[in-house]
Image: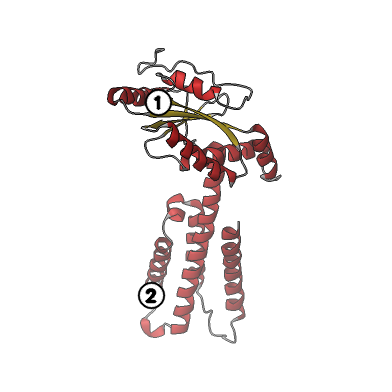
Amino acid sequence: MTYVRRPLIALLALFGGAVTLDRIGLARTDASAIDSHVYVITAVIAIGAFVMRPLRRARAWVPTAVGVVAWVAAGIASSRSIDTIDPYDALAELAFVVLVVVLAHRTAAGLDAIDDTLASVAFGESPALALDGPKAANEIHAEMARSRRHDRALSVTVIAPDPESVELAIEKSGEEVQRALRTRFVKSRFVQAVADQLRRSDLLFEDPETGRLVILSPETTTEGTALLVNRIRESTRRLRLGFTSGSASFPTHALTFEQLVSRAEDRLTPIEGRPSLRAVPDFEGEPA
C-alpha cells in the first residue's frame, strides 16, 4: 500500500498546494502563475490514468508526453505571443503538469497492481494441470510413450500438503482477508513454490479432490527425484509449509503412469483421502 499511499498523498498535496499558492499569489497581483486551462489539462490526464487501462499500464513517459503536448497545444490555442510569456509562469506550469501526471500515473499503476494481485490470488490459474483433465492425459501419455520408446528413466512424485501446516499458515496470513481468499493464497504460494523448483521438462499436476500435487519428471531416476524433493522442501520451508512425499520410477517400480502414482502414494505418510484417478484417458478421451 506504500506504493499507492505516498504518490496519492503527494498528488493531493501538489494539487492543493498549487491552487492555494496560486490564488494567494505570493505577492503577485497581476495574474495567476498557472492558468486555469492547465488545471483542466492535468485533471483530465490524471483522471484518464485511473479510468483508461492502457494509459495507466503504459510507461510513465507516455502520459507525461501527452500532458506536455496538450499544454503546448493549449498555449498555442490561447494565442499568446512569445513576447508576452513570462518564463517563470511557463516553468511553473510545465513543472506542475509533469509532476501531476507522473504522480497520477504512479498512483493508478499501484492501484492496478493491487487489483491484479487480488485477482490472481482469488481467481488466478494454477501452474499445475488438473490431474484428471484431458490436457494432463495427453502430456502423461506423451511422456510415458517417449520413455518406453527410448528406454529412458522417468519418475513420478506425489506431494501432499500437511493439513496442520496449511491451517496454521491460513490462520497467520491475516485476519483482514476472508478465509476463502487466504486459503487460495496459501495454496497458490505452495503450488508456485513447487513449480519454481521444476525443470522445463517436468510436468506438474494437481488432483482437484485432494489438493495433492503430482510431478512427472522425464529422464529422472530415484536419486534425481530425491534431490528435487529436497529443493522443494527448502523452498516451502520458507513459507512455513510442510508436506509428505513419495516417489516411484519407471521402469524400476512400475510400467504405467497409474501404477507409478499408486506406488508413490504407497510411500506417503498416511493421510486421509487419495487421488481418485486410477486410469488416465487416452488422446480421444476414452479410458486407457
The answer to whether residue 180 is above or below residue 70 is above
> What is the CA distance from the residue labelled 2 to the residue labelled 1?
65 Å
Say which residue label 2 marks: 79
Compare residues 234 and 109 and report the one nearer the observer: 234
Q: Nearer the viewer, mark 2 or mark 1?
A: 1
**Could you say whether the residue bearing mark 2 is in a helix, strand or loop?**
loop
- Specify the color scheme: secondary structure
What residue is rendered at 45% in x and 15% in y?
279
Q: Position of residue 92 (x, y in %)?
A: 49, 78
Say which residue label 1 marks: 135
| Residue at the outermost left position | 150
Q: Position of residue 111 (x, y in %)?
A: 55, 53
Compare residues 273 and 52 and report the one nearer the observer: 273
Mark 1 Cα within 10 Å, few/some/many (few <14, many 20+)? few
Q: Position of residue 119 (x, y in %)?
A: 54, 42
Q: Counting residues from the N terminus, which is met first, the one under dot 2 or under dot 1?
A: 2
Asked whether disc 2 touches disc 1, contact meaning CB atoms under 8 Å apart, the reply is no
**Could you say whether the residue bearing mark 1 is in a helix, strand or loop?**
helix
What residue is rendered at 54% in x and 18% in y?
276
What residue is rendered at 51% in x and 57% in y?
47
Compare residues 284 and 176 and report the one nearer the observer: 284
Amino acid at dot 2: Ser
Q: Which quarter of the image is occupied by the N terminus?
A: bottom right
The answer to whether residue 160 is above or below residue 70 is above
